[in-house]
Image: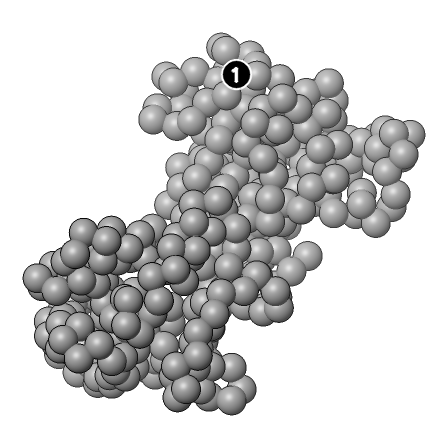
Amino acid sequence: MNTTDTAPEQALEWHRAGKGAALATVVETWGSAPRRVGAQLVVSGEGDMQGSVSGGCVEGAVVLEAMDALETGHPVMLEYGVSDGDAFAVGLACGGTIRVYVEPVGSAMAEDILDNLVAARAARTPIAYEVNVKTGQRRLTSNGHTQRFARDRSGFEDDAQTFVAIHNPRLRLAVVGAVHIAQALVPMARIAGYDPFVIDPREAFGSHARFPGETLISEWPDAAVQQVGLDTRTALILLTHDPKLDDPALHLALRSGCFYIGALGSTRTHAKRVERLQEAGFEADAIARIHGPIGLDIGASSPQEIAVSILSEMTQVLRKGA
């Protein structure tokens, strides 16, 4: 998922509990709108709400409209201008305009579509929800929308009628090597929206004292990587400098669809890494997926600065491609 929002899951729960549920989705914005396109709010027939479409500016009005939509069973398109004063109250420099599409579950959005959407999200399957706001035609698809999936970019298609809501799994980061750079990188990555995993069979390194509250896997990296799984929403970082730890995980990564592979080390260290991979039978195109030396060249020297350079490069690859 592109945020920690769980509006679809809550909508399905409320609908099945007989409370009724309507999903309100930001479908278009102008100016400094508080939430991005695709943000969702779910409203029950009893007035309960979860999520946000405006950071607090127009939620009250959306709740009332959503409850009316539950009564009629019809979807409704709403448009709001957020004033400069209201925008300032939620931390913005200036206001903006948003359009919000409200869909009652069961009448407008079929329960089976919502059920399948929730199942795909639970299975970490990237999926797009398409709705034609003129005809009411709806469907789920994992095909097409390559750029939208890559950039977490919901929005209208060129016909200005078909809205595509992208539901991506949460980003994950597998860090091999519980070293000092990892201590700086892991909390930064969590702030940036990643679920991090720290992998190191050396328990003195991968301890909760060094990584409080984080997920630690004390297996050999290849076994740990298989346990975590490497998909298109996962980045792999290799920080040990030790080929017997890095290389087995690297082999798995190069055969996976993970969006980013980074390996710590100098140019000379990386050249030796390339030689080992060539000897193992990997083609040049596969080896070229590795970002080594790791991170953007910003002149970083401290562990914290190196962590910034790594996270910056991960973001660049995720949003703009390799």
Give the amino acid at mark 1.
Ser
Image location (x, y in percent) of residue 204: 49, 10
* Whether residue 127 is visible: yes
Decide which of 285, 101 is in the foreground and name it: 101
Decide which of 243, 269 is in the foreground and name it: 243
Q: Secondary structure at mark 1?
A: loop
Image location (x, y in percent) of residue 208: 38, 18
> Compared to 291, does 31 lie above or below?
below
Q: Residue at x 48, y 18 (%)?
A: 206
> Compared to 174, does 20 lie above or below?
below
Q: Residue at x 46, y 88 (%)?
A: 160
Q: Residue at x 32, y 57 (%)?
A: 8
Image location (x, y in percent) of residue 34: 27, 70
Is residue 224 toward the left or the right of residue 263 in the image? left
Work out which quarter of the rendered image holds the C terminus and state it. bottom right
Total numbered circles: 1
Corner quadrant of residue 100: bottom left
Image location (x, y in percent) of residue 254: 74, 40
Is residue 16 toward the left or the right of residue 119 in the image? left
* Whether residue 91 is visible: no
Is residue 246 toward the left or the right of residue 219 in the image? right
> Compared to 122, does 151 lie above or below?
below
> Compared to 282, does 129 lie above or below?
below
Q: Which residue is mark 1?
A: 218
